[in-house]
Image (cartoon, rainbow, N blue to C red):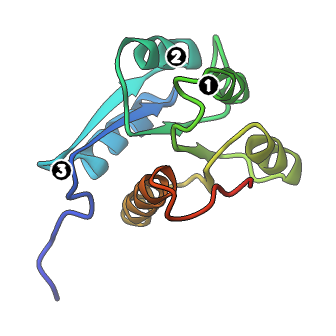
Amino acid sequence: MTDFFYVLTDKTDLLVADDDPIMREFASVYLSSPSATVFTAENGEDALAQLEARSFDLLLLDLDMPVMNGFEVLERLRADPATSRLPIIVITGREDIVSIDKAYALGATSFINKPVNWRLLAYQVRYVLRASTMAARGAIPKADA
């Protein structure tokens, strides 16, 4: 058995938008590290307000939320030059083809289903952040190019 170690070791600010308080708490517990800070939003409108107030390295976004759903958030973020390249991982209980296709069409970077394996999610967050950094530097082409 190996000792526990943190997956997210680079300075990272994550925003988790989910209407389920248990999901927000789990995200805070399982994704926080000495260098990774997790902020939470309880709906899409709250997420947009926080993204307007400060920058984040990545957004974890539920699709089914009150006030403003995840599809609307995706559409708004991709239309705004300030957030058009923000990495967004959709985390949802939906697994139908229409939802998956729509999320990617609106600009999702990645898509995973609930229930969440938090350790795997931490690795996926790390991968998406590194790929996003490399793409911003021109080292790899954008996925939709």
Q: Earlier in the sequence, mark 2 or mark 3?
A: 3
Can you tell which of label 1 and label 2 is closer to the viewer? 1
**Residue 7 found in image quarter:** bottom left
Q: Nearer the viewer, mark 2 or mark 3?
A: 2
Q: Quadrant of the C terminus?
A: bottom right
Q: Which mark is residue 77?
A: 1
Picture disc at residue 29: none
State how far apart marks 3 and 1 are (Cα).
27 Å
Q: Nearer the viewer, residue 138 or 143?
A: 138
For the point 49% across and 20% down, which residue is it?
47
Of residues 140 and 71, the one nearer the viewer is: 140
Badge 1: residue crowd in 10 Å (few <14, some 14–19, many ≥20): many
Judge left or right: residue 67 versus residue 20. Answer: right
Residue at mark 1 to residue at mark 2: CA–CA distance? 8 Å
Tag 3 residue: 33
Q: Is residue 56 left or right of residue 96?
A: left
Is 97 located above or below residue 16 in the figure?
A: below
Amino acid type for the residue under numbered disc 1: Leu
Residue 6: horizontal and vertical position, in percent? 19, 63
**Contact (CB < 8 A) between labels 1 and 2?**
yes
Of the residues shown, which amino acid type is indicated by label 3? Ser
Q: Which mark is residue 48?
A: 2
28 up-or-down from 96: above or below: above
Name the residue at 66% across, 44% down.
Answer: 108
Residue 56: % across, % down:
37, 32
Q: Nearer the viewer, mark 3 or mark 1?
A: 1
